[in-house]
Amino acid sequence: MDKVSVGRLFEFVVESDTKPTVEVLGPARRSVPVKIDPLGSSTLGYNIKFEPMEVGDHSVEVRLPGGGHVEGSPFLLKAYSAEKVIVTDIRAGVVNKSVSFGINASQAGAGNLEIIVAVNGKNVPNFVQSEGNARFKVNFKPTEAATHSLSVRFNGHPVPGSPFSCHIAAAAASPSMGLPRAMAMGECLKQAAVKMDNTFELEGFEGVEPQIFVTSPSGDNEHCQLSQHDGGSYSASFRPTTVGRHLISVTANDQHINGSPFSCNVFDVSRVSISGLEQQYGPANLGVPVTFSVDAAGAGEGTLELVVSTDSSTVKAEVVACARGLYDVTFVPQSTEPHYVNITFNEVAVDGSPFRVDIQQHTQHIQIGSLAAIDFPADDQIVEIFSPDQKSVPYSINRQTAEFRTHMTGNYTLRFIDRETRQHIGSRTLCVFDPTLVKITEVSEALCHRPASIGVSLNEAGQGDLSALVRCGATEVPHTIRGPSKTGVYEIVYQPTRVAPHKISILFNEVPISLKPLEISVLPASAGKEISVSGLGLYQSRVGKTTSFAIDTVKRPAREFDVVVSGPGGQALPVRCYQTKNGHLQAEFTINKPGQCVIGK
């Protein structure tokens, strides 16, 4: 066993009077299907067949029943694929000048390359240079002005496209040979856009028609349209379909003009993609870095130009090369004007350019007494900080960060200034708040199944958002926040569904206004009018902990009430009842195991 082509059946024979067990494992240790057939009644042994589907080393294990591996097992078989050999950079050449092309066999597996360069039935000497990782450069020097055949085989199999053609022309004409003024002119002799008409001009071809050959990186000839004008001048137009280095050969009487063949870089601006500027989550924030990616890896060779600007200024952008043709771009908005990102590739605008980036004022909230830290957007800037009473605030610098202590509620203004010109670049606002100055102005009576409310004033606490969390035991109770009223008072409105204490945590900018939540007793809607019960013990209890609920007896004697609590499984639990100061009857009991309880009276 040695080598086998991917996708082709491989066979071998095991000489044995008993059927062997054969297992074939591919490069990723995946099992390959195996077919085992007896050789026939007159021949002892079995024929083994399988078809490798992956390039790489295959392990072939052969065992006999009741024994171990046969001698030599497991066998190593190398699978290869000539289909994965790629021939590149076939370019037209000139007589007596070295011509080269590339071969990439890095994905083809183990094997041997066979390369034959021929012209008019004769072989042309060639030599191969290894460039590492199964990549090679093939060189030859043509001596005849004719199309040369390039045959490439891998382990005896022709690679895709073989044999290839390479056009060879005579050496450039000298002034004495009749074309002293022949020349080609045009930007597209150096650079051209894919799928677009690219035209160059030809002059000095009196009495002779030029021949144009445009050769793609794969060696294919691109169609070129030639148009004649007066005085021996022509124009040639071609529309390339692939990205990469093209060769443009301009000949007359099978001789290259001066400068031919020309090397033309063909690019595709439509393959430049931009991500990160979609703003699906809304506008970017003032003073907060915006980062987006540019992927030009598949667009060919070229120059990528990028400018970020507003209607009034240009914004500094930092570009980081992550990989070949892949870049991360970051800029920091310094004003709320719309920002525009202009991107061109080889001076052609990328689809969608200029990209608009909307900016909003980002208000940062910080609690009074905290240390505020502000990052500098750039090294060439300084910052001026003013308190709510418009007094300058001193700050310290720590690793490109301005730090200062907040001492009063209100809006602090940060102005960014150019260090050299002292020009104002942009501003930010920092809102300082004090949650302890949030005042509860009113707490309404809370009745079960009736709306209840809490009045809250933020007038002295600074700017920010009011939020709340309403709970009854472990259950969260829905609520809404209304306001503010003309006097600046908000209302937290909730509707209890349980006759039990509710705990309400009030937060300002996500900071609790007090260490403990506000606890409110919820009464039955008929409280004081008829017998009713209330308390958290009606709804939940902890194992081993005493829980309770209250009975409003409406001034009836306690002896008229009989309280029964059945624990999990229907077992009766001891209940202790006693009279409270407000005349209610308090019932207490303890549950010893988890489960559902039933309370009756």
Image (tube, grey):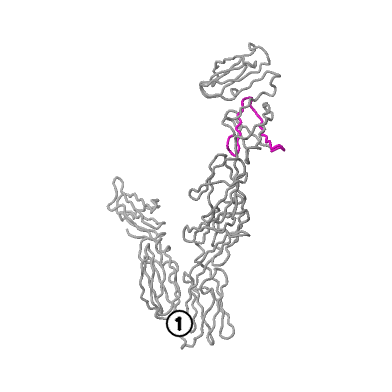
Q: Nearer the viewer, residue 342 or 463?
A: 463
Tell me the amino acid under the disc marked 1. Answer: Ala
Q: With respect to residue 188, does 529 lie above or below?
A: above
Q: Is residue 598 magenta?
A: no
Q: With respect to residue 601, does 77 lie above or below?
A: below
The residue sitting at the right extreme is: 486
**Which residue shows up at 59% across the image and 14% down it?**
577
- Tell whether 58 sits left or right of 596: left
**Magenta range:** 483-512
**Which residue shows up at 62% across the image and 44% down it?**
388
Q: With respect to residue 173, does 22 lie above or below?
A: above
- Tell whether 83 sits left or right of 474: left
Q: Find disc 1 in the rendering and name its residue.
A: 172
User: Label 1: how many residues lie within 10 Å, few (<14), some (14-19) or many (20+)?
Assistant: many
Q: With respect to residue 98, does 45 lie above or below?
A: above
Q: Secondary structure at mark 1?
A: loop
Quarter holding the C terminus is top right
Quarter holding the N terminus is bottom left
Q: Nearer the viewer, residue 208 or 396?
A: 396
